[in-house]
Image (cartoon, grey):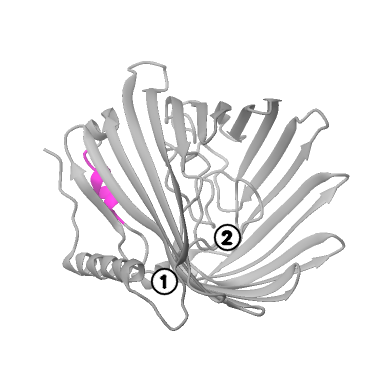
Amino acid sequence: MKPKCDVTPKAQKRKVMAYFALCCLILTPWDNGWTLDYTYNGYLKILPRVAYDRDWKEPTFDALVHNRLNFKWYANLNWTAAVEIRNRAFGGNSVKENPFLAEMLEKDTGYVDLSTVWLEQDNLLIHTMVDRLWCDYYRDNLQVRIGRQRVNWGINLVWNPHDLFNTYSYADFDYEERPGTDGVRVQYYTGIASKIETAIRLAEAERDQVYAGLVQLNRWNYDFQIIGGQYLQKQWVAGFGWAGDIRGGGFRGEFSYFIPQEKAEGAPYLVGALSADYTFSNSLYVHLEALYNERGTTKKAGGALRLDPLPANQLSRARHSLFGEMRYQFSPLVTGTMAMMMNPHDKSFLASPALAWSAWENWDVLLISQFYRGEPGTEFGDTGNFVYARLKWSF
């Protein structure tokens, strides 16, 4: 018998209050010149999967039905509000063989609990999460956003040591919107490509809160940014990053230096990533990226890769990580991709070929595989192999 999700009365109360606020946001009639201009869109995806163990044995089958609903309300020239809801139905072996799946999904790491498992059976689980719920005020050069939102400070395309508020996992390809965070974000634009920004991530535990600021400017056709603040577990952080091009190819970098406030947490350490990409005249796109984690191991990294994102100060278990990607557009409607992530120390890697087809208007088909290879105990060696086929309808 599956264990029931352990939801404390405090968390349950916060969840009820959050949904009450959500209903008020959508249903309350406004006057005083406020309008009812709004947009509504979303998608419905069907994602069957075949999973094998590391030796290509014991295949298992399951499927995911993924629905997203996005609402945005333009109250007037200065005020905007948004609600975005993620609904997923899991079926098959992924539910049957993981008795803690509901407990994992029910857990909401934000300050407000907006995650609910509505139905849990032996081979079916239905889950809903509100991953965007914010109110935005914009006037002149000032923008203030409060609520669950994405605070995107990352520059690179795979590893982001500057993404202090809401990192994401490259392996979770079905979550294009990426996670959000509960907090407050204030931006003041000092020019077309420059700004000063501060943000706060709220969390129930004080050690999970983040307070940081960012300065962004443009010089010599490059965008530069400097960050600083307090990160998880009461660590100071300072960082520098840039984005520009060399001879038509993109060149990016971001580095963060973490300083534990308590001696027991160890010495200061550096996490940094460099990336370069280029599109050839025949539409071939090449992207290379490298990650350095001073606290990472040079031995077997161990453990199966998780879909939940790792924090910005520990983006990989390895000291060094490499990524490469090639993408080619065979026709205006068909694109092929081959991506690989590697731990050069324990020789394990993830290879992910994919073929995307824009089949009809608002309909897309994706065939993608994830092959995790390596010896037992390596970073990618114990995860297995997966083959997916996804049909997506956008509305």
Q: How far across and how far down the image is residue 217, in percent?
A: 76, 69
Q: Secondary structure at mark 2?
A: loop
Foreground: 387 or 205? 387
**Residue at 67% of width from left, 78% of height from top?**
141
What range is drawn magenta here?
99-107
Res. 261 visible in picture: no
Which residue corresponds to mark 2?
Answer: 152
Quarter of the figure with residue 214: bottom right
By secondary structure, the bulk of the magenta-drawn segment is best described as helix
Around disc 1, counting alpha carbons within 10 Å, would you say few (fewer than 14), some (14 to 19), or many (20 or more)?
many
Foreground: 81 or 382? 81
Real-space CA distance between mark 1 and mark 2, rounded to the nearest whole angstrom: 16 Å
* The N terminus lies in quadrant: top left
- Is residue 377 positioned above or below 230 on the image? above
Which mark, by number, is residue 202? 1
Around disc 2, counting alpha carbons within 10 Å, would you say few (fewer than 14), some (14 to 19), or many (20 or more)?
some
Q: How far across and how far down the image is residue 149, in percent?
A: 47, 63
Quarter of the figure with residue 18: bottom left
Foreground: 91 or 210? 91
Q: Earlier in the sequence, mark 1 or mark 2?
A: 2
Kind of residue at badge 1: Leu
- Reply yes or no: does residue 100 show up in magenta: yes
Q: How far across and how far down the image is residue 244, in percent?
A: 79, 54
Q: Residue furthest top?
A: 57
Kind of residue at badge 2: Asn
Q: Secondary structure at mark 1?
A: loop
